[in-house]
Amino acid sequence: MSKSNNYMPPKKWTWDKENGGKFANINRPISGYTSEKDLPLGKHPFQLYSQGTPNGVKITIMLEELLSLGITEAEYDAWLIRIGNGDQFTSGFVEINPNSKIPSLIDNSIEKPIRVFESGSILLYLADKFNQFIPKQFEKRTECLNWLFWQMASAPYLGGGFGHFYAYAPEKFEYPIDRFSMEVKRQLDVLDKQLLNNNYICCNEYTIADIAIWPWYGALVLGRLYGAGEFLDVKSYKNVVRWALMIDSREAVKRGRIVNRINGELDSQLHERHDAKDFISKTQDKIQ
Ligand SMILES: N[C@@H](CCC(=O)N[C@@H](CS)C(=O)NCC(=O)O)C(=O)O
């Protein structure tokens, strides 16, 4: 373990400089909007404002899964919120999510449209609204929610902790990388044991627990997150890898993964989705 640096926290923290990390330009210690701008509005029942990050992808996968069951009431417009440009700090976005984070959703299909923010809350809202991807029996529903909330509580260790210090921080610091690698590996072990005798995360069925967990831990074991596959020895979590590959092969997942995505191969970026046909004709390779 290397020696600590010489930083001594002052008596009172003040914001006097950017921290130099990858998202330094958008981080600030106050909430609220920085510019006045309304959100665009499309014709479908659901208006999604998001970017194709692991949290964003949870919702596009869920909506595509619902549509693949023939539930046309789940039709949606997916608008791109470029978080690197600070689109989450416009007045329109803050109105639907005071926390300025993607994903955020408006349900326009009801008399008094409502906002839904926090990806776990959005998944639960859609699951309850359409009675899909959530067990009906109370005990099983509770187990499903256990894992949904587990994901919501664990992801900040993986993203905000490990991912931040391993991939985004301006320098590599051993202490936080060790601290969060240990926690992420423990979480992977939790999942690996859960999936030892189960095809899906819970209740022997595909649920919003799988849909929430896959974009984070599935992507991690498939080597798609932070370039950390070898570092975390992800292949050793064999049950998680098997589960991740199974979810990866679902057609709705393949579609959901590319909506609002702004990196990777051009044919895997569909910046905005307003129609099922957009997957054929509007990916970046087709429109550039
Ligand atoms: N707990 C929230 C986390 C959402 C979140 O952290 N979103 C990130 C992208 S994955 C974001 O909007 N970041 C922009 C920012 O921090 O300004 C959820 O699951 O919806």
Image: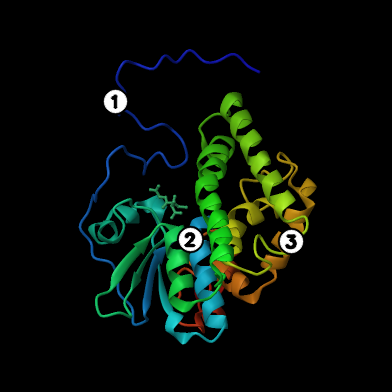
Question: Is label 2 within 8 A of ligand 1 (CB to nearest ligand atom)?
Answer: yes
Give amino acid for label 1. Answer: Thr
User: Which residue occupies the foreground of this view, 141 or 165?
Assistant: 141
Of tags 3 and 2, which is closer to the observer? Answer: 3
Residue at x 74%, y 61% (from the top left corner): 198
Tell me where residue 176 appears, x and y as whole percent: 56, 29
User: Which residue occupies the foreground of this view, 187 or 135?
Assistant: 135
User: Which residue occupies the foreground of this view, 81 or 10?
Assistant: 10
**Label 3 vs label 2: CA separation?**
26 Å
Question: Is label 1 within 8 A of ligand 1 (CB to nearest ligand atom)?
Answer: no
Q: Is residue 32 left or right of residue 225?
A: left
Give amino acid for label 2. Answer: Gly
User: Which residue is identified by label 2?
Assistant: 56
Asked if residue 48 can be seen in this view, the reply is yes
**Label 1 vs label 2: CA separation?**
32 Å
How would you rate the neighbour count of disc 2 (Cα within 10 Å): few for under 14, some for 14-19, many for 20 or more? many
**Label 1 vs label 3: CA separation?**
49 Å
Tell me where residue 284 appears, x and y as whole percent: 52, 70
Taking the view exactly as shown, the residue that stands out farthest to the left is 36
The label on residue 198 is 3
Residue at x 28%, y 67% (from the top left corner): 39
Q: Is residue 252 left or right of residue 31?
A: right
Of tags 1 and 3, which is closer to the observer? Answer: 3
Residue at x 59%, y 34% (from the top left corner): 180
Quadrant assignment, res 61? bottom right
Quadrant assignment, res 13? top left
Q: Give the structural element (helix, strand or loop) at label 3.
A: loop
- State which quarter of the image contains the N terminus: top right
Q: Give the structural element (helix, strand or loop) at label 1.
A: loop
Q: Give the structural element (helix, strand or loop) at label 2.
A: helix
User: Which residue is identified by label 1?
Assistant: 14
